[in-house]
Amino acid sequence: MKKPTPTDGTRLVYLAAGIAALGGMLFGYDIGVISGAILFIKTVFSLSPGMEEIVVSSVLLGSFVGAIAGGVLADRLGRRRLLIGTAVVFGIGAVGAALSPGTAWLVAARVVAGAAIGIASFVAPLYISEIAPVGIRGKLVAINQVALTSGIVISYVIDYAFAGSQAWRWMFGLAVIPAAAFGVGLTFIPESPRWLVASGHADQARAVLKRIRGPEEVEGELGEIQRSVARQKGTWSELLGPLLRPAMIVGVGLAIAQQITGINMVIYYAPTIFNFAGLPSASAAILASVGVGVVNVVLTVVAMQLIDRIGRRPLLLISLAGMAPSLFVLGLAFSLPQLSGSLGWIAVVSLMSYVGSFAVGLGPVFWLMLSEIYPLRIRGRAMSVGTAANWGSNVIVALSFLTLTQVVGKGATFWLYGAISIGAWLFAYFLVPETKGRSLEQIETHWLAGGQPRA
Ligand code: BGC
């Protein structure tokens, strides 16, 4: 057999990241698909507005539960094995929704799909981060966010394609294809060498490192992981103790910031917002939504190219600095009736600039940093706390957005998100560290030695 060279190793890492990122794609597809499917389901199952809301948000509930359960599982079972299990659950959720005889069944299937999303949302970045070489770690983890945003666009396009025939079952069912590719692909890629060391399988970790690194790097990296693991207790009390408190504040704070600055009001309600803004027809509103989705993908690709070069912090700060004014302009467009002629276009442009700003920083940087800032032996559990905070805040925004627009008005709702973006910028400026160019072991050693975020 040919001896692996560093180039072969890097190729395998890219392949492994690409396969793990199918988890991100399924995440995006499964949250996006409901927007089109619901239009038909509500007629077929005669849903009341309340039931419609339950059908739509059941996936978020499942994700929250999956995020909580996934942490212990990731630390116990391993990253790859858990992802394989998740692929099966994704498949069950997709087929289950497609075959739904009634509402209760459909809700159950969506909760099941949600559980898979909640787990994959953080275990995919976690796995990629742990196999990546330091210098391209940001880029590789960002592939997951590119896949996620592409999954959203693909779901819109599939919804659009099946809308004519009202084939909502196919909209759900087709997700079984990427789920199968995800599950089968995962059986060909190696387990995370870091998890193998943490669970006492140093020899297997060495074998994996030999496949994904140059021969001269293997022992150095293995030794660094082993020394770092030896310093960790791997208990909940370590995670909640004073040394890791700054890291918990960064992870949970960014998790909440990513959601309460409003991104999912756009992902879930873009056509509704465009209707508010007076776009001429439903199809124009849907087309504008696809445009928003494409901007989301393109700017995430830009972030992927920049994230290891200019760093995580600058992208985060630029991102929030772009989101805040975009939201203020959006709010203004909804508050000035005399602008009504051009109102629609101002809304479209400011919404695009808001989404583009999110995509270039806060979108990918949050998931990346969450996968970087916690010590190995408790990484799964720690990420699951941040992920649960992210999904919990996601539910709150999804359930409050429309009510907020009715109570305080549309303009004020966007201004509120804008004001929160300024708060998030200050949080990032003062509390979020730079992780570019540092190995995961250097980052964990820093915290465990009592280091502060900005030191
Ligand atoms: C967020 C999701 C959001 C997506 C949009 C992700 O990073 O966690 O809540 O729907 O980005 O692109």
Image: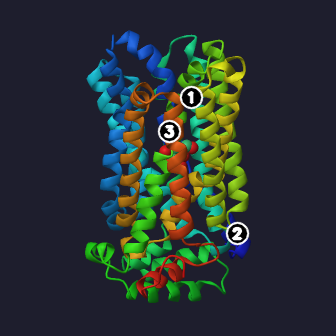
**Distance of mark 1 from mark 3, alpha carbons?**
9 Å
Q: Which mark is residue 8?
A: 2
Left or right, residue 336 beside residue 59:
right
Say the numbered circle drawn on residue 264.
3
| Residue beneath the point at 31% across and 63% down | 72
Please report contact status of discs 1 and 2: CB closer than 8 Å, yes or no: no
Can you give x and y, in whole percent of width and height, for residue 113 in the image? 38, 38
Q: Residue 306 at what x, y percent from top left?
A: 72, 61
Give 307 or 226, whichever is nearer the viewer: 307
Asked if disc 3 and disc 2 are in contact, CB closer than 8 Å, the reply is no
Q: Is residue 274 visible?
A: yes
- Please tell me whether residue 64 is drawn above or below residue 243 in the rendered image: above
Looking at the image, tell me whether mark 1 or mark 3 is earlier in sequence order: 3
Label 1: which residue? 270
Could you classify mark 2 by the number of other residues whose Cα lies within 10 Å: few (under 14), some (14-19), or many (20 or more)? some
Q: Residues within 10 Å of mark 1 (few under 14, many from 20)?
A: many
**Disc 2 on helix, strand or loop?**
helix
The residue at 28%/25% (across/down) is 105
Q: Quadrant of residue 291?
A: top right
Q: Amino acid at mark 3?
A: Asn
